[in-house]
Amino acid sequence: MRGIIVAASFILTFCWTSGALGQQGGGAATPIQIEADRMESSRENGAVLFFGNVKANQGSLIINADEMTVVYARTGKQPDTSAEAAAGPSQKIEKITAVGNVKIVQGDWVAAGDSMDFKAEERIVILSGNATAWQEQNMVSGEKIVLHLDEGKSIVESSSQKGERVKAFIYPSSQE
């Protein structure tokens, strides 16, 4: 029963701590909804794991993956009440990882890869393994795409395999 309470408290208070992955579709106070075939929570590890057909959305931001792990930051402060103890070590998200068929969608922007790491404090998203991003017809791909959300900067890296290169297809606007 206590495990169910811990899991429910994680889900009911679940939101990005430093703002949404994308700024347009939600903010730090916008709740996140996650659906999966299975969920496990570990108060000791400060993590919630989601397995099977995971779909997370916050506002217009949608993340799909085979598996997703949400890791909460440790505060070091002991809980004052049993409700705080049931809520886990912290409600501040440290990082989110997703693996297997990762797809991120927000508006006309789509990105995909084998895995995703979101570092909440730095607000950096790293897509790895056949990473590709599209906006309308424009596309860029490489082994890894690093998105610095607050800086509006992205870095695309090629594989270390000989002959592998970063690829971009850019369609100039038809407007003058």
Image (tube, grey):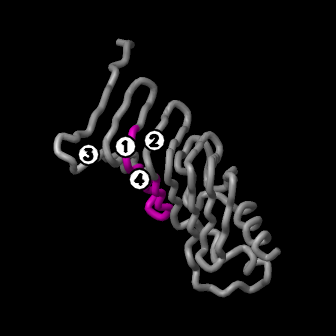
Q: Residues within 10 Å of mark 2 (few under 14, many from 20)?
A: many
Kind of element beneath mark 3:
loop
- Contact flag, marks 4 and 2 (Cβ < 8 Å): no
Q: CA distance from mark 2 to mark 3?
A: 15 Å
Callout 1 amino acid: Asn
Find the distance from the CA under tag 1 to the CA under tag 2. 8 Å
Of the residues under marks 2 and 3, which one precedes in the sequence?
A: 2
Q: Quadrant of the N terminus?
A: bottom right
Task: Kindly identify which numbered label has been placed on residue 126.
Answer: 4
99 relative to 4, above or below:
above
Q: In the structure shown, which secondary structural element does the residue marked by tag 2 occupy?
A: strand
Query: Does the magenta run of residues contain 129?
Result: yes
Pointer 1 or 2: first along the chain: 2
According to the image, label 1 marks what residue? 130
Give how far apart the Cα atoms at labels 1 and 3 are. 9 Å
Residue type marked 2 = Ala
Q: Would you say the residues marked 1 and 3 are in contact, meaning their CB atoms lie under 8 Å apart?
A: no
Q: Inspect this view and state whether residue 34 appears.
A: no
Q: Which portion, as a residue range, is magenta?
A: 116-132
